[in-house]
Amino acid sequence: MKMNNSMKNNLEKTSPFLRACRRQAVPHTPIWLMRQAGRYMPEYRAIRAKYGMLEVMRTPELAAEVTLQPIEAFSMDAAIIFSDILPPLIGMGLDLEFEKGVGPVIHNPISSTADIEKLSTPTAAENMQPTLDAISLVAAELTPRGIPLIGFCGAPFTLASYAIEGGGSKTYAKTKALMYSEPAAWDQLMRKLVRVQVDYLLKQVEAGASALQVFDSWAGLALGLQDYVRYVQPYNTLLFREVARSSAPTINFSTGTAVYLHEVAACGGDVIGVDWRLPLDMAWEMIGFDRAVQGNLDPVALLTPWPELKSRVDDVLERANGRLGHIFNLGHGIFPNVPVDNVRRLVEYVHEKTSNN
Ligand code: CP3
């Protein structure tokens, strides 16, 4: 079906997910799961058996198909576009590859201020057009069905950590050493990353995304309070301020930030994503009950038998306590070995237990 403006307006009014982002009343607590399109689904594995990760992301029809897989299989309240946080780095000059069994690898990591100087800042149209096209395809499919699509990007610290370490890290030592010893170069790197991500986020909304999530997965695992405030907060604040030019609600997600969630919230975002390290009510209190929150089931709960899983879901819902502005999600991405039936049962149970009629 073709999308028109009245369908888009209707989506804004009726989607439980979009209503919860704005702390409006909802017919049930909305739920979606980070990494909901992924290896735990046989349909996803079938596509990946034929195509590489970057190939799926760069082929709009394939990216759209994978995005829709969890929507067809479960009654999720939102879809998230299938891509990754790292591909925007390619157009900036970084040689990214997803290596089987390893994860993302950057073959020419940043190691000097000259490398930062050299980084390009391409527009999203130059850099990420296949993803923007995939967003248009998915939105055309989902808007008439009343389901919103989430666009996303990586936050500058998390992207910088991959660009400098060349992949995942346990210590973030290279990233932090550069940050501490070359503050002017760090500023330049963060500003370049923000510029590229802001354009990308705004273009995702133009292409049909109804909400935006910013993933700052690693800042909290790497940085203490003072370093977060000094080296991350100014740039995340800039990013959220720039993106507020669009009307799409924003989700500010991080992990390991329990010690300074109030500083995370101060950066901006209509919704604050909460990992599994604090009980939801304690986290929400630190954030402020005047903001919406998303979370925070421990992803490992999906690997346990139903009675254990159910009691952990009940705990999250009890701590949310029916307040306006709760989006149910995991505290971090779903694991590849989660049984599909547990996902189905989780989604159905959250809807059933929170249903107003
Ligand atoms: O949530 C979704 O369904 C949308 C797609 C999505 C992916 N990655 C797909 C993916 C999103 C939103 C991401 C974000 C992402 N990517 C983050 C932030 C979120 C988080 O988990 O903290 C980070 C840190 C990355 C970087 C990344 N990409 C890693 C570390 C890995 C390897 C780990 C792994 O699970 O294999 C990836 C690869 C990746 N991104 C996969 C998927 C489905 C697995 C690729 C495969 O099919 O083999």
Image (cartoon, grey):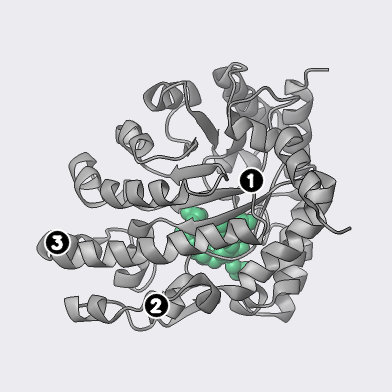
Ligand 1 within 8 Å of disc 1? The answer is: yes
Report the residue marked by disc 1: 33
Mark 3 or 1, closer to the camera = 3
Is residue 267 shown left or right of residue 148?
Answer: left
Whether residues under marks 2 and 3 lie with C-beta atoms below 8 angstroms apart, the answer is no
Task: Kindly tell me whether residue 305 is visible in this rendering.
Answer: no
Label at residue 92 = 2
Ligand 1 within 8 Å of disc 2? The answer is: no
Report the residue marked by disc 3: 183
Query: Residue 204 appears at what percent x and percent y?
Result: 59, 60
- Precedes in sequence: disc 3 or disc 1: 1
Label at residue 150 = none
Task: Kindly tell me whether residue 139 is visible in this rendering.
Answer: yes
The residue at the point 32 percent across, 67 percent down is 192
Q: Residue furthest front?
A: 5
SS for tag 3?
helix
- Precedes in sequence: disc 2 or disc 3: 2
- Mark 1 neighbour class, 10 Å CA radius: few under 14, some 14 to 19, many 20 or more: many
Query: Residue 217 appears at what percent x and percent y?
Result: 42, 52
